[in-house]
Image: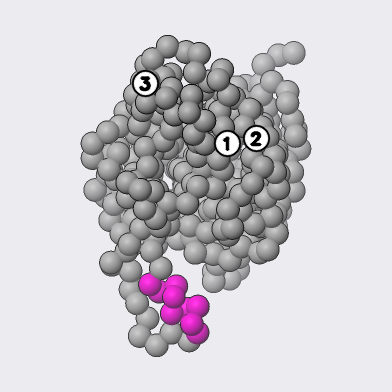
Amino acid sequence: MFRLPPSRFSLVLLVVSVGIGRADAPSSSASAETVSVSQKTEGKRIVFIAGRPSHGYGAHEHHAGCRLLAASLQEAKPDYKVTVIQNGWPEKGSGVLSGADAIVVYCDGGKRHLLNPHIDEFDAIMKSGTGLVCIHYGVETVKGKPGDAFLDWIGGYFEPHWSVNPHWEAKFETFPDHPVTRGVKPFQINDEWYFHMRFRDAMKGVTPILSAHPPESTMRRGDGPHSGNPHVRRAVAEGEIQHVAWVSERPVSERPVAQKPVTESEAAETQTAGRGFGFTGGHFHWNWADENFRKVVLNAIVWTAHGEIPPDGISSANPTREQLEANQDEPKPSQ
């Protein structure tokens, strides 16, 4: 994988009835772009919502990261319809979120989280059974109504003055037996891995996917809304393992149930809860070049959409340096 100062991803995509060509980034403030659509539409429909520009080159690359993941997903699942929305919440009346099997949110969080002004509207989408994936800062919101909604939607969130956001090299050696871990091999990688997340009581319906012991160095900053607090210091001192990626399930009372399912699996599918995934990595754009780092997220997107994950997981070609450098918000620094 690339360890260079941060890089852009030029997507070569299949365009229906046109052939192969480059999809240029949309220019409107919150416009939708269909990455690729197959002739048949039996596959799932996935919508990526990329937040506005944030950090400097190579970090918090919401648009470039979504484009990269969308292309990787399309490569593995050519029958899926994958759409990327740039610069935040979709334009009013677009209807792009309606009927989505899963929505991926990669954006700045806290008070600025793009979902905060739309809690009730988005909750109706969640109650229909749509899956939700939140990446990096996109797992952070504020206590109260937004935090409670995140607990319901994805099972946990970054709560200021409880959770922390240090940079550290996490080593992932073992994984639970879950579809999201299929094909994922042990790996270690440096990122801004948030931990000590606020989870549902007793972790009800929540399954940790990536867990590790943070080093003592993660506790060297003073107390603050993101840097430290007595609760997390006690947990680290006691050697408590920390979960930095997780899946969850939630009851969906409004999901329609088929009257006469064809198979047992179809019968179970009609009654399956809505699904969520939280992934705290993703600060460094270059980490998407790591096959295992990327596979965990691709597996999770498919799982939240109730899609099929093969025994070796959702595989895709590692992006080249040129691909990693494409679509970033800031120009590449001069050498």
Which color mode does the image show?
Answer: one colour
Q: Please tell me whether mark 2 sits on a helix, a strand or a loop.
A: strand
In whole angstroms, how far apart are the C-alphas of marks 3 and 2? 24 Å
Residue carrying label 2: 171
The 10 Å Cα crowd at callout 2, few under 14, some 14 to 19, many 20 or more, is some
In primary-sequence order, the first of circles 3 and 1 is 1
Q: Is residue 269 left or right of residue 293?
A: left
The 10 Å Cα crowd at callout 3, few under 14, some 14 to 19, many 20 or more, is few
Q: Is residue 135 magenta?
A: no
Pointers 2 and 1 in contact (C-beta within 8 Å): yes
Q: Please tell me whether mark 1 sits on a helix, a strand or a loop.
A: strand
Q: Which residues are magenta?
A: 263-271
Residue carrying label 3: 230
Quarter of the view holding residue 30: top left
In whole angstroms, how far apart are the C-alphas of marks 2 and 1? 6 Å
Q: Is residue 330 above or below residue 186?
A: above
- Say which amino acid is labelled 2: Lys
Residue furthest out toward the front: 238
At 47% from the left and 78% from the top, the residue drawn is 266
Q: Is residue 46 above or below residue 89?
A: below
The 10 Å Cα crowd at callout 1, few under 14, some 14 to 19, many 20 or more, is some
In whole angstroms, how far apart are the C-alphas of marks 3 and 1? 20 Å
Q: Please tell me whether mark 3 sits on a helix, a strand or a loop.
A: helix
Residue carrying label 1: 212
Residue 97 percent across, percent down from the top left:
39, 54
Residue 111 percent across, percent down from the top left:
32, 28
Q: Is residue 42 above or below residue 244?
A: below
- Say which amino acid is labelled 1: Ala
